[in-house]
Amino acid sequence: MAVTEEKMLLTQEGWRRLHEELAALRKQRDLEMGEHRQAGHSGDWVESAVQYMSSDAVALGRRVAQLEKVLLRSTPVGPANREQGKIGVGSKVVVRWDDGGQDNFLLVGPPEVDIATGRISYEAPVGCALMGRQVGEWVEVISPDGPSQLQIIAVI
């Protein structure tokens, strides 16, 4: 029996960007394969494909396969999928830590994470602790550095 992977949530923007990236990579792969054939590497398709498999082509193929796998198990989520005032994928959240520091986060799916811009995964310790919560709540976050508390200041 095959093991099925759990659905992954993505923001609508992230889902669209991954689809665009996949389309562009497929087009690039097809163009490169066509150029390879035109360069005199004829023969049957399988033989041509094997000759074509440079390290760049392998990396391109791996990224295409990775994106296909992610998108097959992904569901885009937008504001209509969230309960009003509750934190979910796509929510912008302002929090205050128990030490007085403040952060802004955007909860996203794992392939969309960009810590430098505050895009955190709903599967990460902070993201997981925030899911389903509301403004004013205090939340305990368990991370490798130990437990800490934060208060939800705003959900945008």
Image: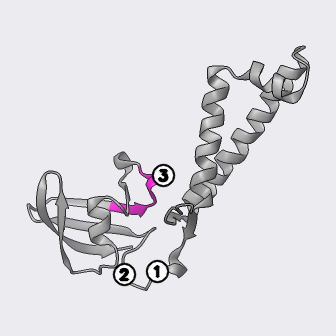
Q: Which amino acid type is marked by label 1? A: Arg
**Mark sitting earlier along the chain (3/1):** 1
Closer to the camera in the image, 39 or 86: 39
Q: Which residue is mark 1?
A: 82
Q: Which amino acid type is marked by label 3? A: Pro
Q: CA distance from mark 3 to mark 1?
A: 20 Å
Q: Which amino acid type is marked by label 2? A: Lys
Residue 154: x %, y % from top left: 30, 74
Residue 27: x %, y % from top left: 77, 39
Residue 149: x %, y % from top left: 13, 67
Q: CA distance from mark 2 to mark 3?
A: 22 Å
Q: Which residue is mark 2?
A: 86
- The residue drawn where x is 57% and y is 67% is 76
Tag 1–tag 2 contact (CB < 8 Å): yes
Task: Kindly indicate the quadrant of the structure image that contains residue 50.
Answer: top right
Report helix, strand or loop for mark 3.
helix
Q: Residues within 10 Å of mark 3 (few under 14, many from 20)?
A: some
Q: Taking 152 as reference, is 54 above or below it?
A: above
Residues in magenta, as a range: 105-113
Quadrant of the drawing holding the C terminus:
bottom left
Q: Which residue is mark 3?
A: 111
45 sits left or right of 57 in the view: right
122 sits left or right of 51 in the view: left
- The residue drawn where x is 19% and y is 65% is 141
3 sits left or right of 150 in the view: right
Q: Taking 110 as reference, is 4 above or below it?
A: below
Q: Residues within 10 Å of mark 1 (few under 14, many from 20)?
A: some
Residue 48: in magenta span = no
Residue 109: in magenta span = yes
In the displayed image of the protein, which residue is found farthest to the front? 1
Q: Look at discs 2 and 3 and give the one toward the viewer.
A: 3
Q: Residues within 10 Å of mark 2 (few under 14, many from 20)?
A: some
